[in-house]
């Protein structure tokens, strides 16, 4: 003799829910006669196969028979409204168990989704920290830098000839970056406007502007202005290394 799960049912309530769904029974108005008969058929089938049935299935069988018996007893008309339906407790247990099954399916789906994800532990970046401090009083915001760019652009517009020859520009951001680096090799800082003769094409001015923005973002240069509307200075940044040049 050995114990098995009846058709992979997890207990008698699971078996009852299966029967209710299979025969399309209204769970709030269970016909106890037919439900009990179907349940007992499963129990008898297990007995015929000489399978040891878990005691909880037998307990449920006795409860179903008791509820069925109570429904067969004659009812007094004057007390009908006062008496409780003997099926009420069973219906409550079935609904609660049904809810637990649905929640279990939802949690299992969430578990399967989470199993597809991989969490990476935080990376230690302390070795990249710098002891150098930014001097906030010497920094400017992007608006002031754009105003300086516009000022250079306007000067170029005023001084360039009215007729020009269209040709392909070969001046790159890398060249502009190198030009700034060359200045910083011999100077701790220099005036932003000293980069230009104001006879350059506007494309070259734009290239210098973009190069300085990239260098500032990387910490290779600082962009400083002593007071509002004064000239802008380009200085060595916290990540600038003279030996790298």
Image: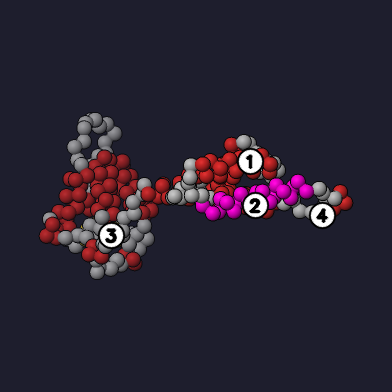
- Expressed as whole percent of the image width and height from the top left, the position of residue 102 reads 54, 47
Q: How is the image coloured?
A: secondary structure
Q: Nearer the viewer, residue 142 or 196?
A: 142
In which image quadrant can residue 174 be found? top left
The reply to whether callout 1 and callout 4 are in contact (CB within 8 Å) is no
SS for dot 2: helix
Q: Nearer the viewer, mark 1 or mark 4?
A: 1
Find out whether residue 228 is within the magenta segment. Answer: no
Q: Sort mark 4 into few (<14), some (14-19) or many (20+) by Cα contacts within 10 Å.
A: few
SS for dot 4: loop
Q: Sort mark 3 into few (<14), some (14-19) or many (20+) by Cα contacts within 10 Å.
A: few
Q: Is residue 199 visible?
A: no
The residue at which mark 1 appears reads as: 37
- Expressed as whole percent of the image width and height from the top left, the position of residue 33 reads 68, 41
- Expressed as whole percent of the image width and height from the top left, the position of residue 37 reads 63, 41
Q: Earlier in the sequence, mark 1 or mark 2?
A: 1
SS for dot 1: helix
| Marks 1/4: CA–CA distance | 29 Å
| Marks 4/2: CA–CA distance | 22 Å
Image point 34% across, 59% down: which residue? Answer: 140
The residue at which mark 3 appears reads as: 123
Image point 31% across, 55% down: which residue? Answer: 120
Find out whether residue 56 is within the magenta segment. Answer: yes
Image point 41% across, 47% down: which residue? Answer: 112
Q: Nearer the viewer, residue 88 or 108?
A: 88
Q: Earlier in the sequence, mark 1 or mark 4?
A: 1
Chief SS of the magenta region: helix
Location of residue 158 with respect to 225 vertically, above or below: above
| Marks 1/2: CA–CA distance | 13 Å
Location of residue 236 with respect to 147 vertically, above or below: below
């Amino acid at each position: 003799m050995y114990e098995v799960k009846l058709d992979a049912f997890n207990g008698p309530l699971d078996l009852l829910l299966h029967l209710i769904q299979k025969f399309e029974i209204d769970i709030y108005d269970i016909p106890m006669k037919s439900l009990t008969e179907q349940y007992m058929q499963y129990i008898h089938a297990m007995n015929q196969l000489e399978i040891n049935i878990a005691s909880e299935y037998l307990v449920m069988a006795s409860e179903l028979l008791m509820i069925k018996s109570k429904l067969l007893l004659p009812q007094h008309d004057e007390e009908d409204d006062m008496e409780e339906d003997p099926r009420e407790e069973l219906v409550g247990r079935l609904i609660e168990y049904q809810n637990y099954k649905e929640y279990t399916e939802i949690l299992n789906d969430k578990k399967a989704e989470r199993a597809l994800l991989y969490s990476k532990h935080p990376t230690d970046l302390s070795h990249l920290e710098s002891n150098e401090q930014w001097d906030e009083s010497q920094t400017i915001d992007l608006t002031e830098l754009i105003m300086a760019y516009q000022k250079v652009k306007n000067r170029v517009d005023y001084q360039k000839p009215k007729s020009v020859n269209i040709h392909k520009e070969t001046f790159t951001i890398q060249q502009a970056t190198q030009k700034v680096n060359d200045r910083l090799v011999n100077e701790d800082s220099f005036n932003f406007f000293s980069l230009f003769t104001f006879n350059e094409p506007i494309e070259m001015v734009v290239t210098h502007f973009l190069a300085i923005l990239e260098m500032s973002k990387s910490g290779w240069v600082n962009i400083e202005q002593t007071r509002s509307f004064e000239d802008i200075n380009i200085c060595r940044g916290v990540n600038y290394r003279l030996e790298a040049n």
